[in-house]
Amino acid sequence: MERPLTKNIRDGMEPLDIAAYEKSGGYRAVHKALRQMVPKDLVDLVTASNLRGRGGAGFPTGQKWATVPMGDNVPRPKYLVVDADEMEPGTFKDRFLMEGDPHQLIEGIILGAYAIQADIAFIFLRHEYTKSAQRLTRAMAEAYDRGYLGSNIAGSGFSLQLRLHISAGRYICGEGTAMLNSMQGGRAIPRHRLPHPTVSGLWGKPTNINNAETLCNLPHIVNNGADWFKGLSRCKDGGTKIYGASGKVKKPGAWELPIGTTIREILEEHAGGMREGVKFRAVIPGGASTEFLLEEHLDVQMDYDSVPKAGSRLGTGTMIVLDDQTCPVGMVHNLEHFFARESCGWCTPCREGLPWTARILKDIEEGRGMMDDLGRLENLGKDLWLGRTFCPLAPGAMEPLRSALVHFREDFERHIREKRCPWR
Amino acid sequence: MATIYIDDIPYEVQPGQSLLSACLSLGFNIPYFCWHPALHSVGACRQCAVKQFRNEKDTRGFITMSCMAEAANGARISIDDPEVKGFRKSVIEWLMMNHPHDCPVCDEGGECHLQDMTVMTGHSYREYRFPKRTYRNQDLGPFVNHEMNRCIQCYRCVRFYKDYAGGKDFNVFGIRSHISFGRFEDGALESEFSGNLVEVCPTGVFTDKTLRRHYTRKWDLQTAPSICVHCGVGCNTIPGERYGELRRIHTRYNGEVNGYFLCDRGRYGYEFVNSDQRIRQPMFRGNRERPLEPTGKEEALQHLASIWPGPSKVIGIGSPRASLEANFALRTLVGRESFYLGIPESEHRLLKLVLEVLSSGPARSPSLHDVELADAVLVLGEDVTNVAPMVALALRQSVRQKPMEICDEIGLTRWADAAVRETVQDRKGPLFIATTAGTKLDDVATRTFHGAPDDLARLGFAVARVLSAEAPEVPDLPNELAPLVREIAEALKAAKRPLVVSGTSCGSESVILGAANVAWALCKEDQRADLCMIVPECNSLGLAMMGGKSLDAAFHEAAENKGALAIILENDLYRRAASERLKGFFGNVKTIVAIDHLRNSTVSEADVVLPTATFAEAGGSLVNNEGRGQRFFPVMPPREDVQESWRWVRDIMLVVKHLAAEKWQSLDDVIATMAKTVPAFNSIADIAPAANFRIAGMKVPRQPHRYSGRTAMLANVSVHEPKPPDDPGSPLAFSMEGYEGQPPAALIPRFWSPGWNSVQAINKFQNEVGGPLRGGDPGRRLIEPSAIEKVPYFQETPEAFCRRDGEWLIVAAHHIFGSEELSVLSPGVVERCREAYLGISPEDAETLHVAGGIKVKLVMPTAEYTVSARIIPSLPRSMAVLPVGLRGVEAADLPAWGRVFVERND
């Protein structure tokens, strides 16, 4: 099995420096793309490779690039913003890639920037990722030294400035337009979906936002072609994916596997199955803001189309496993408490509805719940939904709750009936 | 037109607007909070949700925010769909979770948009059982009260204060469910438009602090349509009264003038009406050694009759703060030859010039709404923010016009406010500001230029010359100015709606000429160019149109012919001329009659004082700087012996057997005579319905139908309910009885509609939200430009400013708080007034060895002052700035030369 994204990553070792990275074939794609391909070729190649955005929404990357205005008469500078603000609970895939092979990301950024002819790229990095920050800073300095960043990259005539921006730390910054507002020094509040950032983004200029993992795929697509990339996967999406698992599994971690690997394979083969004494109960497949899947879903393929068919989303592809010794109400309360705290405060349903949700759940968990509360939670689950809120934060928060109310109904009712948490 | 389907019924609407504004214009009730007709859509509150259907066959539909969706042709929505109704109810429930429900003690109660919307959605029972959040409130100064616990986080306040009005000391703080709005730390709000927070806030977070001291619910306020008297812009207002006391001023929407807003001087300057300095009885003294003593109305009039010297011996001094009718009545009494306008010769010349350039040239005087739409602006000589604040607010909107064209290019509707601001970023359209010193509006200017008035004028002449070869050349223009001149000319020429703003406040005729030349040079056959002239007082332009002689001429006449009697109408001459000259004048006139409403220095000199009504107790017409004639109506009947000035003049005419007055029973009679006598006012009767106007036989009630305590208000005096005071002079009644529907726009006494108790009821008075009031916005333009073959460019280019050794050119500075006579009697305004100072440039300060705050002595031909020095970095050398009207600064003809000395203690 090929593992292009992680081939340079060795547990507990410093990442490759630029010389070693180049020796392992690094920056070859930059030479190839910038010298032999026009931007349109690169967009077409990536479109043909079926690369889909790894941030969670799974939008085809080539299609997104194609919406960036091109030509001489477009507003300048154009920006590429790299979403490395990995704050989704249970998710640590970008960290794995940035700490493990920072040059791979930088090479991907150069290619992504070339495709849309961006002048400036920013890495928007999660505040707590200090090791990533150190390693990226060093790698960027090396890349500038070696002429892969700055003006006239590798003699191609293409120039790109790359800056590392360390976030002040809000979950909402993972929403691309809130990220742009925060970079502009404003409040991290999402923007309306129109105009799209590719038309009017950072400081009102065309801006493409790509997830860090998405960009890491680019050097390999350029080097090996679209067919090779599609061939890596077990479904129609192209490539591999960093999957992860946390919770009471034997070996929590992150692994690069073909897209379309089943949940069972990830949990049993790679995470080593459940710890002794606990049984699998459910899993949130893609970070905290996805719906619970149960034992009957273990053979679902983890890809952008199969997971929704089972009633959830692939999201970030990093699973949180719920076992039979952990209170599901407590778990959902923990999640909702997080989401309520991370609301930006812009729209009413999210700002007011999430803390209410969290408070009701706390009451239930601590034995003060009422049967009416379940109806209230269901209503909140319906009202804090897509189209009714300004951005997807609150609907994301509702996904685990809505499914928990279905799958763990009996646990909720028992809390209320017994006026206590049965797990305590 | 676009057809949209609302609950399956087709409606024709203006395309391009939002669904919310389309539905509101059609008269539907959709609740909303963050949307505001002037601030537009951001989609934050989620209250205006509707169900939208993709097509005829779509029965499921999807919930969408009507403020964020376009009313596109064929759009199908449902307002009454049960699912979306449930969602709207949920939104209110969330908003009310933390709201304190303190309506009984909240000043917003009874005119609260949150109350209205809560009732509209049907939310009545709160299921939230957890503790409410609380905040610490801030002291925001004398105008606005802060009660954050009531906040529903609609973000309107910050969007108005920061985004719309350009304020810098107000923001949103916190995150998640703990958002708050206010200042970084306690302190008076710095914006000149802070009072609008009171009306913009949909609930009781920001309320009127002056109203709070004499609080009355909206339903207990007697109100009438009025006009602001505190500057020349003529904003429309709704003053509210109870128990004979004026309680507050609210905005009266006028789409052409002030729209939804007012400045703080206009909103908070009203308290002079309640001042203990009011004169309520006639006063008289036998000789000037004795104090004034109260007397009866008849006695006062009989005394005047007994000493009446005959019309040619009477000097009549009018006033730019009195109505046209009052001035006209006085002019009729004394005769045209003896009528003086009550303004110094210098100001008279400036006003005549303003009138001339507006009526004899091709450029049109714009309404405030037109100013907002200008896409390139040159300001010549005016500190707009301090002299005509609402023009500054309009200019802040105008700089967005040009950049917003980008939005049109990428297909972004202009009402998508947040997206538009993100797209526009900090791009600003061309705005060039040339003034004597820096102004607050400079932060949105493309370029600024500071110089002496003559140099400002030369800049204007030079720009005009670039635009038209027929305009005169400017000799010896410094080379370094050439690029600026070219840049201004090119920006104005490229604009679709160029605008030049100038006026009288820097005291220079040349500046007005220069501004006129620029505007005229921009007018082409298919090119409109606006010329906005700012005048100092509420009726300055009206007075100029009426015509008369200056105060200096009156002084001259009194000195030459030893006048027997002078009648001074609503005018404190000490604000217009130096006290030395006034002493001479008063000495030359045997009897001084002052008709005024407040004790002031002029009243103290008078032999007979007649108590007149303020704008709140009087009716009349004013002409604003646009040349728009506007009518104001009394809000309350005058008390005691107070009556309108024109009635005092009429009464004098009756006792001295002046026949013209016999027909003057009501204001309409004076207006009719004036319309016949003064050609400029031919159509003045049309600006508002006449006194005999009735709807279904009824008058328009000044009191709302919920007006309470009517029978108990005076029960401590008499248990018999008094008959409401008559008001034969207007179509309004001092009563709650009358026509309950919508009156013509000029007569709207308050904005109210069933279910809409707050100011948001304005929507119900417009055919299109944000558009004109039904039947057209009130007021009528009385000045129009001339269609002329050849532009009459002014040829009198002034010489460049030339420094003098040891002398400074003293120019006037104006302050929104302190420079205007009446508003400084409001305690809140007093708090915001600064102390008198002399502004000097840093270079001159260095030469004089003074720092800011050090006392300096200014010696001018007419007066001497000892004031603190204030260093003004933007001020050119050899110029000094004297703030007019501030306490301790006597009237002076500025600009003038003066000497500055440092007061040394040693």
Image (cartoon, coloured by chain):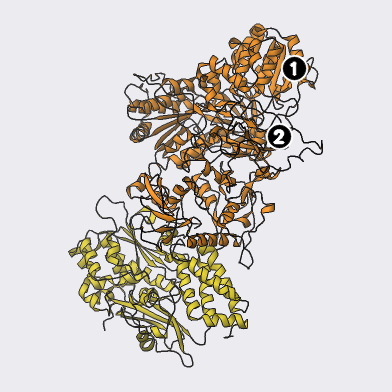
Disc 1: CA contacts within 10 A as few (<14), some (14-19) or many (>=20): many
Residue situated furthest bottom in the rendering: A276
Rendering quarter of residue A34: bottom left
Is B118 above or below relative to B245?
A: below
Whether residue B175 is visible to the viewer of this picture, yes or no, is no
Q: Residue at x 26, y 55 (%)?
A: A70
Q: Which residue is mark 1?
A: B607
Label annotation for residue B274? 2
Callout 2 secondary element:
helix
* Front: mark 2 or 1: 2
| Chain name for mark 2 | B
Q: CA distance from mark 2 to mark 1?
A: 24 Å
Q: Report x, y in % for residue A410.
A: 53, 82
Residue situated furthest left in the rendering: A36
The tint chain B carries is orange
Does label 2 or label 1 sit earlier along the sequence?
A: 2
Disc 2: CA contacts within 10 A as few (<14), some (14-19) or many (>=20): some
